[in-house]
Amino acid sequence: MVSTPAQEQPVDPQDRSGPYATHDVSNQPPPLAPYDASQDIALLEGLRREGAGWAEEDIRRLGLRAGSAEAQEWGELANRHEPELRTHDRYGHRVDEVEFHPSWHHLMRVAVGEGLAAAPWADDRPGAHVARTAGGLVWGQTEAGHGCPTSMTYAAVPVLRRQPELAKVYEPLLTSREYDPGLRVPTEKRGLLAGMGMTEKQGGSDVRTNTTTAWPSAEPGVYTLRGHKWFTSAPMCDVFLVLAQAPGGLSCFLVPRVLPDGSRNTFRIQRLKDKLGNRSNASSEPEFDGTVAWLVGPEGRGVKTIIEMVNCTRLDCVMSSATLMRKTLVEAGHHVRHRSAFGARLIDQPLMRNVLADLALESEAATTLTLRLAGAADQSVRGDDPDGTESAFRRIATAVGKYWVTKRGPAFTAEALECLGGNGYVEESGMPRHYREAPLLSIWEGSGNVNALDVLRALSREPATADALFAELALARGADARLDASVTRLKAGLAEGSEAGARRLVERMALTLQAALLVRHAPAAVADAFCATRLGGDWGHAFGTLPDGADLDAILARALPDGV
């Protein structure tokens, strides 16, 4: 009988060691958390530059908390265990409540406690609104959905100030750093959250077509509403700003969930939306029927009354897109640092470095623009703008940023996900959640077309906005020939602008503005690569097509320092 050679001996099925082990894990990255979400050079530089350097210690502390394993798990659990609607209690009484997982409340408690809701309106320090935006760029790396009620609460305060007697009652509670969930009489709570109900099924962004009606009662300033809103997020907020048709035209109203006598206001939640992303956050269709409301601003001036709310929430859309970019860039960078293929770590392979560096440019440009917009907002709302230049710049640049940065989000997130390969396509990685979130920010507060047309409207009706934009661009004049050429083309484009060409014009405005900010504030490697690609045309149609001369090492060292 011929013996079997040693090298061909049959495998012992009980042997769990050596070359035959099936469950040894290798070539997989360790968990990213804990990490420091504030370890972002562009963010910290922008924080100081825009007048909020005093908040750096708090931002760094919040960054460590955002990147902790606990906070990252809160974000995952809040999306896995979605909010549930309870229309009635066990006895058949109408309650219209939404129940959230405890992780949602943990996230909200930190956000409100850190001043990411309306706290800046009660803070006299210059840069308070910038500090809030930087906090959002950091804490938002936990989870995006709970940023909706904090954003609306922030944006509600300047609207309520149009009605001083209402602001006197509600503003101290909206600006509180106390998270006090549950439906109770607003004035008996330690802190309040605000939502908004603007859109209806027949109109969407065309809010002037709203059919919800508002009829005055015997009490001055008090109305009753009847109608059906199509998209009202965060229905467990305490008060809502709502648009409705009063006898004098479209008007703005404050609607509390609980009335001063402790009874429930009529706010019948017909259903919760089954959304692509943002699933931790409840979005509802409420029905009003004899709902009590207080008039905010004059009758017939509803859109003009809420315009400041739109400016604030649009800034938060830009901020949230920049946050998603940063979060997914960090996830991609972490993965490729620890994963090897074809004989080398992914991060050491030239083509992967090109992809990451290109993403890093986009991320820094988004973050830098976000903080510049926050700086303009801070000066504008504080009155530190004697000639109105910052207010005019804010007016046009926020709409430009809202159009462009939110448009870049989905493509950016998809590319970052691809850096993880199949691992990134699996829910456990967290990347699919980020990918589903990205399109929302281009839709909320006006889709791309709405914002592009709003830019044209500002240019035609408010000429000071164009002057303010070009004054900002002039601060970088002479530093880069490609930037100077883009400014020249942009001036010509304004004279030739048409509605059909609005997107093209606004895209050019956004890229030129981002380039000007990077030329002034970023290292030469970053500014040069951005100008060469986004303005000079030395770029492909996908991320990862930077030219051979780009300083990838310097770009990546800035974007992904050790520990991130």
Image (cartoon, helix red, strand yellow):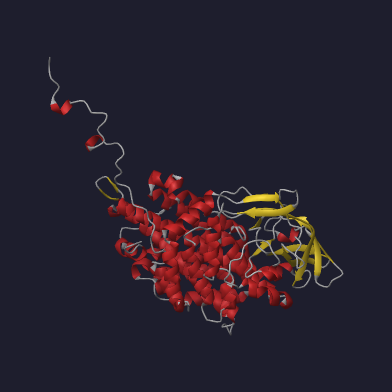
The quadrant holding residue 62 is bottom left
Vertical comparison of 354 with 315: above or below: above
Task: Report whether residue 460 is seen.
Answer: no
Vertical comparison of 183 with 178: above or below: above
- For the point 76% across and 67% down, which residue is it? 251
Q: Nearer the viewer, residue 185 or 537?
A: 185
Task: Report whether residue 55 is seen.
Answer: yes
Q: Nearer the viewer, residue 334 or 319?
A: 334
Q: Nearer the viewer, residue 296 or 187?
A: 187
Point out residue 138 in the picture as x, y percentages from the top left corner: 46, 65
Quarter containing the C terminus: bottom left
Point out residue 393 in the picture as x, y percentages from the top left corner: 56, 74
- For the point 41% across and 65% down, which residue is it? 64
Total numbered labels placed on residues in the image: 0
Point out residue 38 in the picture as x, y percentages from the top left corner: 41, 67
Quarter containing the N terminus: top left
- For the point 57% across and 73% down, which residue is it? 119
Left or right side of 193 for 553: left
What is the residue that sits farthest to the bottom in this orientation? 386
